[in-house]
Amino acid sequence: MNTPMRVLVAEDEFIIGHDLCDTVQEAGYIVEGPFDRITAAALSFQKNKPDLAILDIQLGDGIVYPLAEQMMAEDVPVIFHSGRSTPEELMRRFPDARALSKPCPPAEVIQTMQAMLSD
């Protein structure tokens, strides 16, 4: 039996974070989070490297870009989930990542996750 993949979720908006975690968990993944601060997400990342990360850009203690860069350097696929930046802006800066605009339908989140994990 295969072990479910682990997904780290960093989102500082309480309801969105918990909805996103519920969506990921209902799709059969193990969820780490939601983390509302970069420091907490980074600590979780160091303790138990996830198979994929879903990151809001602005967390309670700053912009998530340095953490995203560290994750991608360690071959962890990243999906940005933001209401502030457009997917086009994010794709220019992070061509190997994916970007979803808030609000994003759960089916699109799951489809994007599955596509990234199968690459």
Image (cartoon, rainbow, N blue to C red):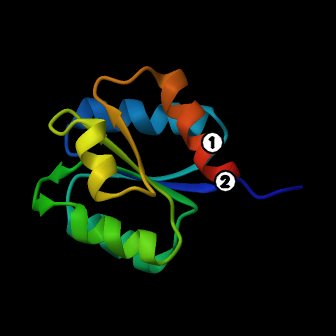
Q: Which mark is residue 119?
A: 2
Instruction: Give how far across and how far down residue 67 sits, in percent.
Output: 29, 69
Q: Relative to 35, is 76 on the left or the right?
A: right
Residue at 54% x, 22% y is: 107
* Residue at 65% over, 55% down: 5
Taking depth in this image into account, of 71 and 48 the one nearest to the observer is 71
* Whether residue 16 is situated above or below residue 68 in the rendered picture: above
Inspect the image, locate mark 1, and give the three-letter code of the amino acid beneath it: Ala
Count residues near mark 2 (Cα–Cα under 10 Å), then give few for <14, some for 14-19, many for 20+.
few
Q: Are marks 2 and 1 in contact (CB under 8 Å)?
A: yes
Residue located farthest toward the front when viewing the structure as drawn: 92
> Residue 25, which numbered label?
none
At a point 64% along the width and 52% down the height, the residue shown is 117
Q: Residue furthest left?
A: 61
**Nearer to the camera, 100 or 59:** 100
Q: Nearer the viewer, residue 113 or 30?
A: 113
Query: Residue 76, percent across and down?
Result: 51, 66
Which residue does the numbered mark 1 point to in the structure image?
115
- Taking the spot 44% from the left edge, 39% from the top edge, the residue there is 21
Residue 85 vs residue 26, the one in the foreground:
85
Quarter of the rendering occupied by the N terminus: bottom right
Residue 76 vertical placement versus 11 (above, below): below
Tag 1: Cα neighbours inside 10 Å, few (<14), some, or many (≥20)?
Answer: few
What is the CA distance from the residue labelled 2 to the residue labelled 1? Answer: 6 Å
Q: Position of residue 10 (x, y in %)?
A: 32, 52
Residue type (three-letter) at the residue carrying disc 2: Asp
For label 1, the SS is: helix
> Is 16 situated left or right of 53 in this image?
left
